[in-house]
Image (cartoon, helix red, strand yellow):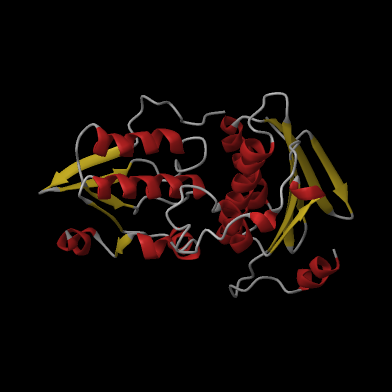
Amino acid sequence: MSTGASPKRRRLEVEDIGDVTFVRFTDSKILDEANVQVIGDQLFSLVDNHHRKNLLLDFSRVEYMTSAFLGKLVTLNKKVQQAGGRLALCNIAHKEIFDIFVITGLKRLFNIYRDEQEALQSF
Amino acid sequence: MSAVHEGKKAGNREYCWRLPSDLGKIPQLQQEIMQLLQQNGFPEPDVFAVRLAVEEAVANAMKHGNRLLPNKAVEVALGLEDDAVWVCVRDEGEGFDPNSVPDPTSDENLERASGRGILLMRHFMHYVEYRDNGRTVYMVRRRVLASGSACHVFCVSTAQA
């Protein structure tokens, strides 16, 4: 069995575009219960240790996620707000992933944009 | 890990797993369930829905039911029928009242970090019922037809369950 949960493996691709940090997930099927802690820690570290405060998350590769990851996003949203910044999501390509944000009401909480151009203009 | 029991009833197949309360065991369970669904021709929306609902139910059973205690197990049963798939997840905890779980979509709960699993299970499965004081959850997903709608035949048998 391979969970792919090694804490040493990088789960994120990070690129700074002006004062916005653009984050891509490296794997489409890692946002499950077993791996979400590692990914959450890497996202939190961007704010807590690397002092990024404007985050744009690219969901184009994300094909699966659970409520555990939603919890991480809620916490991340609070962290960037406390740092005086903003969290935005873009490129949600899969209908089921978008549905999850609608069903849970989190579409009301998060700033969701069609693509990165639209999202970057919002900062 | 693989199904510890595989049986056949009137052309339908049933599978059972017994897992320790270890979240790291969930991906392999998911893999096996996804393979079963794909091998039996369930379309992608059904596979996504069952995968998500099973993960939410098993994670809840391990974390909130069994409190991640290593001496407590979670049992998962899955049945493949022509028109549907059913899943039963049972823990060894003290049980809970599913109606007492706060609405995670209300404004006051929207920024809580947890509490959305049952909501997702109820959305992605066509039928969800808690039994045995909340220790067992039984869920049904009807097969999506080529037209995009779920099979109606199973509505009757589910309502009678």
Given residues A93 and B109, the one toward you in this image is B109
Asked whether the viewer can see residue A62, the reply is yes
Q: Tell me the residue at 30%/52% (across/down).
A: A58
Q: Is residue B24 above or below residue B133?
A: above
- Residue visible at 77% across and 68% down? B154
Q: Residue at x 35, y 36 (%)?
A: A11
Q: Position of residue A21 (x, y in %)?
A: 19, 46
Q: Is residue A66 visible?
A: no
Residue A92 position by quadrant: bottom left
Q: Is residue B100 above or below residue B65?
A: below
In which quadrant of the rendered view does residue A26 lie? Answer: top left
* Quadrant of the rendered image containing residue B124: bottom right
Q: Position of residue B96 (x, y in %)?
A: 71, 47
Task: Name the side, left or right, on which A15 lies relative to A113.
Answer: left
The quadrant in which the C terminus of chain B is found is bottom right
Q: Residue furthest front?
A: B108
Q: Position of residue B80 (x, y in %)?
A: 76, 53
Q: Residue furthest right?
A: B10
Residue toward you, A15 or B143: A15
Q: Quadrant of the N terminus of chain B?
A: top right
Q: What residue is shown at x 26% (from left), y 46% (from top)?
A: A82
